[in-house]
Amino acid sequence: MTVPATSVETRFALAKTVAREAGALAFHYFQQRETLVIETKRDLQDVVSIADREVEQLIRQRFAEAFPTDGVLGEEYGLEAGTSGFTWVVDPIDGTSPFVNGMPNWCISIALLKEDRPVVGVIYAPCHDELYAAADGLGATLNDRKLTLDPSRNIRNAVTGIGANNHVTPAFVAGIVERLLEAGGNFIRNGSGALMLAYVAAGRLVGYYEPYMHAWDCLAGYCLVNEAGGWSHAFPARGESLVKGAPVLAAAPGAIEDLRRIAGI
């Protein structure tokens, strides 16, 4: 089904504005992070603070004001269903662990679904003042510079991002890393899956794989990678599947087959 261009473009413009506003609030908290009360969720590596909650509240408020019938799914406050057919998918601060430890590897991630398909992806990295933005059929940009992936880049002449969390065993992740290294590749992990997906779209990484990831971590990055000319493994975004995790893999053209084989996808 074709999505009316104006309905997506209007929301796309809003997403970029809201991402910068949310980023400014998050950066304010980042500068005074020593005063934040840090709470744990699933384990000691899965943390949250008032910054995450207030940034998500701000984003929700802005979308409710402009598009009150849109749904919103956020990491901190869950799913609020809408009736418009559009659902915003938000991670207020992806990379909270780097955030609270004073590292710049965190971002604001905003995706827009039309039914179950990501049609807008915006990721803002405040510490670098980098705004990654993409919309269905409009391409992807970094600070308004068009992003187009180089097909000559592959796992052997570039770097792959790898993610891990306590939803999968250390042995499983170790197997992924072992297969990547045996195939002649190399990897990094910076603590923010959303930001590493943006790096794939920008050509800084040739691919990103995480065995278990949530919609708010990956859907904005998927839109960016796809619009930059890359490929992404389908994420189940319909019904209850939207709030559950799934494997995430995105790649530049020259790395698709190698990374699918390494990931077993």
Image: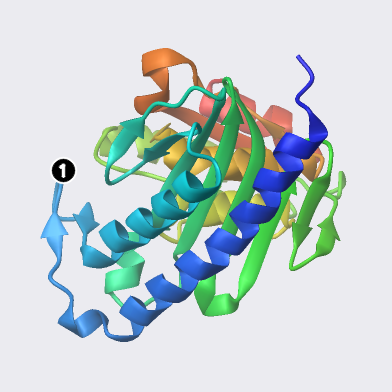
Question: In this picture, is 253 found above or below 245?
Answer: below
User: How are the colours assigned in the image?
Assistant: rainbow
Instruction: Give the structural element (helix, strand or loop) at label 1.
Output: loop
Q: Which of 43 and 85 is in front in this view?
A: 85
Which quadrant of the figure contains the N terminus? top right
Along the line of sight, which residue is nearer the eye, 211 or 158?
211
Quarter of the rendering occupied by the C terminus: top right
* Residue at the image position 21 percent from the left and 57 percent from the top: 47
Residue at image location 55% in from the left, 37% down from the top = 219
Instruction: Specify the quadrant of the image occupied by residue 55.
Output: bottom left
Residue 226 seen anywhere in this rendered image of the structure: no
Nearest the viewer among 71 and 26 is 71
Q: Please name the amino acid that badge 1 sits on.
A: Arg
Q: Position of residue 2 (x, y in %)?
A: 79, 19
Q: In this view, does 53 lie to the left or right of 235?
A: left
Picture coordinates of residue 35, whole percent (x, y): 17, 82
- Residue 191, quarter of picture: bottom left
Indicate the position of residue 109 as horizontal and vertical percent values: 50, 52
Give the side of residue 93 with respect to residue 260, left or right: left
Q: Mark 1 points at which residue?
A: 42
Seen at 71% across and 46% down, the residue is 10
Task: Where is residue 148? Give x, y as percent.
Answer: 85, 51
